[in-house]
Amino acid sequence: MKRIAVVLSLLLVVSVSYAEVSFGGLDLSRDELLLFSAQADVPGRAPYTALFASDLSRVGGQFSQSVAGGDVLRGVPLVPLTFFPEVMSHVPATGQIQIQNRFGLFRADIATGRFEPVPGYPGFADGARIPQGRILPTLSSPDGRYLLVTEPVSAAYGRLVLIPAEGSGGAAATRRRTIVADRVELSTQIPLVRWSPDSRYFVYGHSGAIYYYSIAQFETDRVPVESFRRLGEGSIASVRWAPDNSLYYLSGSLVYQIRDTEFFTRSLYSGLLQIGTIRGKLPFAYDPNFDGFWIAPTGESILLSKGGRNLFVLFLDTDDFVDAGQVLGLPSLFLPRNTRVRQVEWSNAGDVVVLTGDVSGDDGAAVFRLRLRPGVEGLAFERMPDARVRSIHLSPDQSRIALVTTDGVRLRTSGWVEERFVPVTDPLHAVWIDAQRVVVAGSATIEAVSVSGARTLVGLSQADDHSLLPGGTVVARVGERRYELSLTRRTDSGIAVSAWSASQRTLNPKNTASERFRVFLEALSGSYRTVVMVRRTQGVGTSRLFASPEARYEAFPADDEPVDFDYFTHGSRIRRREVALVFSAIDDVGGLTDILMSLKAYGLRATFFVNGEFIRRHPAAVNEIADAGHEIGSLFFAHFDMADRRFQITSDFIREGLSRNEDEYYAATGRELSLLWHAPYHFVSDEIVSAGRSANYTYVGRDVDSLDWVSTATAERLGQLYLKSADLIERVLAEKRPGSIVSMRVGIPDDGRGTRDDYAFHRLDVLLNGLIERGYRVVPVSTLIENAR
């Protein structure tokens, strides 16, 4: 019994440690208005707090109702008061800003400062579960009438759903949600959809193909089946809309332009007609897995990102066979391998502004500018002096650009003259709402800032503390400043909320009891750490204020498995829900930047294994891994198959190979390797394990092989082992257990005859989200070893 008690206690501690949301800040007024807060853990950044109001006076004779997750109060509203901008966008047709976070989707009128939930979107106040990990972005049509939402159906797949934003008027307001596609690959980083500028169409990609969808056909119930809406092979990275609502599609080395009036005919007769009009040719084949592009507003040129980092400006021309007598040196920009293009702004006048970033985050941001003029030679990208830039935003009239930096927003003219610097605490997003005003959303407040310097409070992102005063006045403290708003009961059982304004009021001590109720917190073991409970003081009854999700964490095994600390293949199966991701760097750096950026975005450490050849070829990449704080072990000094009978593998050979790799690593980094290793191809034998042990090394095995190394050519020999990246993710999540070691690789698998159709490192965010949803933490191998002892 003592052992069982210890295990149960440990499991309780672990489940609490990995949960995502905790509630608190209870403050109940005498007239039964209630304030409470919800603190959400967000991967890669500090937790934030959302403030909510409720009205217990609405509780009638029937105290509660049964729902999944327990009894909850009946008929009690939950009203959000703060709106942390995990994602922010502008709805041009309505002039509103749209904010999405894990508690819901909201739109705000800038003039009134009032936020309203977008009807039809499932938010926390409507009973939806608060998601964990990084959220899947929702895309609104430019006219604001429709939403495109991805609803997960499994770890790596979801449904693409079209939802009318009710109340926006027109036929959209009367229609229900519609499933556009049943099985799309999930991603928190790669957009799944692109809306046309006039909101009449959108295109989406899944399963290696691109499809269009017509809103006019939807509103008249004439949507063809998906196979008749197929535009061609590729992904969403293969297409972009031009301002004239034509679609540009890159396939191979050709650039196609598709007019919106051609969609149905071109897709219906795709076997007979080319997909569009050829507008130009590329000097190399376009790979949507790694490349990107942007179209000039005039449609006459293209900015091509090869490999996600090298930029080329190409003037589109369909005839490149004969030399016309003039050869132009076209502008290009070659960026380091650890760098990615984050944003591009392109004006009608031909000014191109590019924001790049690397794995170091804000410190690695750089801004480049090109004044593109057709027919002019000697054009070049110029690096601008701006540092620590998070995003760039061109004004609607293209006369200004806003640069969001870590300490505020810089407003510059098109000639790059700074008009104004607006200091903002931790700015996260910015959107222009007209030619004179930009809305800046930070981790504390949301403000509209004018070019003249005037600042108007739109809302609060979060509050450090709060208090409910008599009469329904809410006071919130944000840093050293205080703000207030008023709550008013509505006749429809809701709560009317005024806009926030500056306040001189002080915060009162919080109260948890009224004449009829007491409120308190109850600890949980699922994805909610706590839940708000309401207890009647007159009569009998205790109920939850809102539904809490049932714990979805997998049960621990009844017994642990033996752990071999010389040949370490897994950690403890019963002590913690944790796994180690191990990445083997063999000879190629492909995908390394994506891996490091994803791990940084989630604030996680992994274990990398490097061999001597990789160190010699890519010393800067090895330093990048080390500088990011990851654990680095040895993959031996050379990459070859130790099972090959042509080689004689002795203990001395193993020790010398490990020692030589230590020296290679030290010469490249000035650091020492961790005393962890595995042989090439994960070959293992008693002899090499013993030899490594004699040099104080632990041999690291694996109990989950991701199979991301299987190429299309290898698939011909291995058949069913080849899986799409989304299926690889689902397989890993199905096979992992507490203490698992999941092996993955750095680089593009290529045996000289084939690679892959897609790559798991591009969907590492989906794997990390899946682990978080299941209550797992990602740790280095050394932590698994320590926690297993």
Image (tube, rainbow, N blue to C red):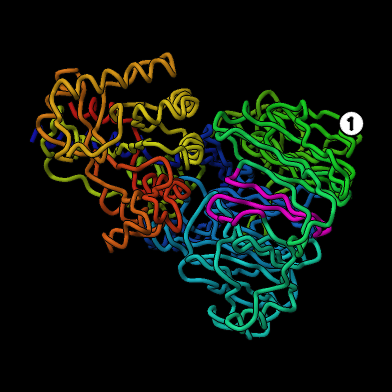
Residue closest to the eye, 233 or 193 = 233
Bounds of the magenta segment? 283-308
Left or right of 557: which side holds 529? right
The magenta stretch spans residue 285: yes
Residue found 25% across the figure and 51% down from its top: 735
How many marks do you count on the picture?
1
Tell me if mark 1 has few (under 14), some (14-19) or many (20+) residues whose alpha carbon lies within 10 angstroms of its own: few
Residue found 80% across the figure and 29% down from its top: 422
Point out the image quarter for the C terminus.
Answer: top left
Amino acid identity at mark 1: Val
Please, is residue 328 above or below residue 220 in the view? Answer: above
**Residue that badge 1 annotates:** 417
Please, is residue 586 above or below residue 492 in the view? Answer: above
Q: Position of residue 682 (x, y in %)?
A: 23, 39
Q: Position of residue 590 (x, y in %)?
A: 47, 42
Q: Position of residue 249 (x, y in %)?
A: 66, 64
Residue found 11% across the figure and 42% down from its top: 559
